[in-house]
Amino acid sequence: MIFISVLVLVFTIAYAEPLLGNSVDADSSSQRLSFIGFEEFENGLPVGMDSTFLTRTGNSSSVNLFERDSTVYLSGNSSLRISANDSTDQWYYIELDIPGDFRCITATISVKASGLHRSGNQYDNCIIGFLYNGLEGNRTMLLEQLPRDDYDWTEASVSLNTETEPARSIRFIILSSISGTLWVDDLSFTYDDDCEAIPMDRIRGPLAEYIGDLHRPAPFMEIPPQPEGDCPDSISAAEFSEDMELLKYLIEYGYSGYTYWSSNGVDFDSAFDSLEALARSGNSIAVLDFERLTADGFSGIQDGHLTVKGHETHRFLDRTNPYFASVIVELSQCEEGDSILHGQYVVIQSRYDSVQPGMIYTGPEERMFRILARQGSQQYQLGVFSDEDITEASFPFNTDPGSAAGSSGIDTLKLPLHECNLTARTDDSREGVYYRTLVDGIELIRVRSFSSEYHDTLSDFIRLGDTLAATDRFIVDLTGNRGGNSNYAKAFIQSLNGVAQWRMNYAMLCSPATMGAVAGIPATEDSSEDWVEYINYARNALELLRENPVRNWIIRDESLPPRQMGNYNGQAVFLVDRRVASSGEAFIDYAMSIPGAVRVGENSAGVGIFGHPRYYWLPNSRIQIYIPFKLYIAPGYEEGVGYMPDYWLDSPEPIHEITEWMNNPESYQFELPERGL
């Protein structure tokens, strides 16, 4: 069974009264519920069930309804009818407390539907499942989506195995937050040996390449706290072996990239064999040798978050960058009678004597980078996209367009290349996480970080979204924003645009390693309420894992949802450079929910597929390891490549170029900078 994310704004917990008139089985330790026929109702609900507020999606105060239906039922004399229409905007679900101790439980229910469909801003959920105190806290959910549209009575079931899914305070829930009518009848529960066989979990879509077993047993190891002091020069062989075993445990049971890289050229067993050989090399082991040998064993990994920090800092990301030639070409759109130039890429600007305006570029399109240009024209700067540093490349040109039909005019010219001039930009001296100003009549907002340590300031940034919603154009300068907490990015776009969607497949690794990294952090008086809550959640999960140690993948988004668009109709431009990483890149994807949003600059950092690093320390060597435990798979995004801009900008003065382009759409022309000759 797959964990499925349900968008819940308020999730209060109600505990049901003992069921009256329903069938229970006697058990040696408790009463087990076996069958509900939806024959007895009290205050409009089946006896023993409670309704709980889920969320609000509008302001009309129209509530989804739970009613006894004595005309449509499968057996007995009635069923439960759940209904809503397109104007419904207040949603409740019903829940039922599940008593007793068991290893496994299966709920089977009969359902019938008429016109079930998502409308407007409704959350697309029609589900049965279990809600319990588990590895994601007291709102852990194991759910099964029900069919939509129209259908006659059919069975649906959902199973929870508490040996692989540690669970307490289990409730069965029925939830529909869409339009139409759902009838339910004949709910039964089976347990343990009588429990329906739980099918093998199979991951579909992009996540399948990154995830192996969804659930498997894991040894329990205590995660040591941060040690005091710097890394020593050396440690004993016994101390080294202790650190090595912990490192091996953290990688296998705490790293979200372990399965993927094991299947893509990284031999972790060989890496640890090399470390074991080092342990046998003498009574004393140099810490520098330890960290370097570890980094060498992990060298095939492409992950911008994974880090080994000892005497040196070792990272594992080879970034792909643009290298530009100082040549601009334009797609010729001549009249039909001019057959020579029409559809050709004609040089209109060059900093080289060997390349003159009027020549035609005849090379591959992947060496053309679209740039800002006047309305109606398509202009490109030539260059190469490479994960290696390069200083020159060859480009073919037709140097004599008058003989285009022949090949005698084609020359291949070797041209100097330079890195994007955006990286040479001189930052201004303004302090603060973000600032707002007016440049050439256009609102400019620069935001440098989404770190939670700037919560108060970023709360002001979020509120700015409401203000910008009333403007007809603005620029957000994201350059240098290495991330932090993506909730700030989401909240800003949502306040501006009404919709903020990070379109991705998402999964989280839950194990004694990933929970232990947080559970041991002390909460202080200065800790925020959210942070204290997160620490307590990790401690709760760790206690469950101590009783039943497992390594589980929690799938939040297995299938890729369609892109949702918001309501901001102005001109929104986002400036991006190679330093925009992690939650900064989440901002880019959220911004794609804005109709007509434009990304300008260069490709972002590409630090995000293996996300949300946990911080660990090896107790004897005091080496610090950053190990990500989440997966974020987004279309159009690659590790080390990031998100591509809509328009590349090879300029040390990007704000000037963008405002000129926005203010002069019919005449704007980018001028190549002097650098790169």
Image: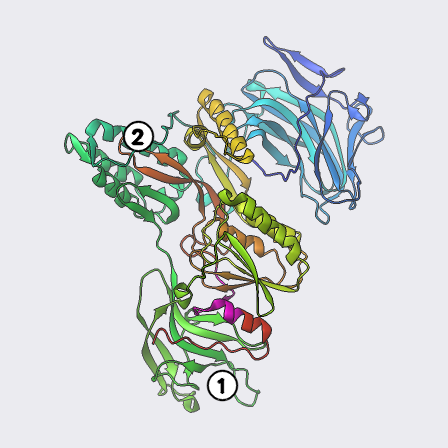
Contact (Cβ within 8 Å) of mark 2 with mark 1: no
User: Amino acid type of disc 2?
Assistant: Pro
- Of the numbered discs 2 and 1, the one sitting upstream in the chain is 1
The residue most toward the left is 282
Above or below: residue 539 compared with residue 122: above
Residue in the picture at 30% in, 69% down: 391
Which x, y percent locates residue 461? 58, 51
Above or below: residue 602 compared with residue 262: below
Q: What is the span of residues highlighted in magenta in the rendered image?
A: 644-658
Pair 2/1: label in front:
2
Which x, y percent locates residue 452? 50, 43
Nearer to us in this view, 242 or 39: 242
The mark total stands at: 2
User: Amino acid type of disc 1?
Assistant: Leu
Look at mark 2 in the image and give the residue it sits on: 619
Residue in the picture at 48% in, 87% down: 340
Q: Which mark is residue 341?
A: 1
* Circle 2: element type: loop
Residue in the picture at 39% in, 24% down: 220
| Residue 94 visible (yes or no) | yes
Which x, y percent locates residue 411? 34, 83
Label 2 – label 1 distance at C-alpha: 69 Å
Which x, y percent locates residue 116? 74, 42
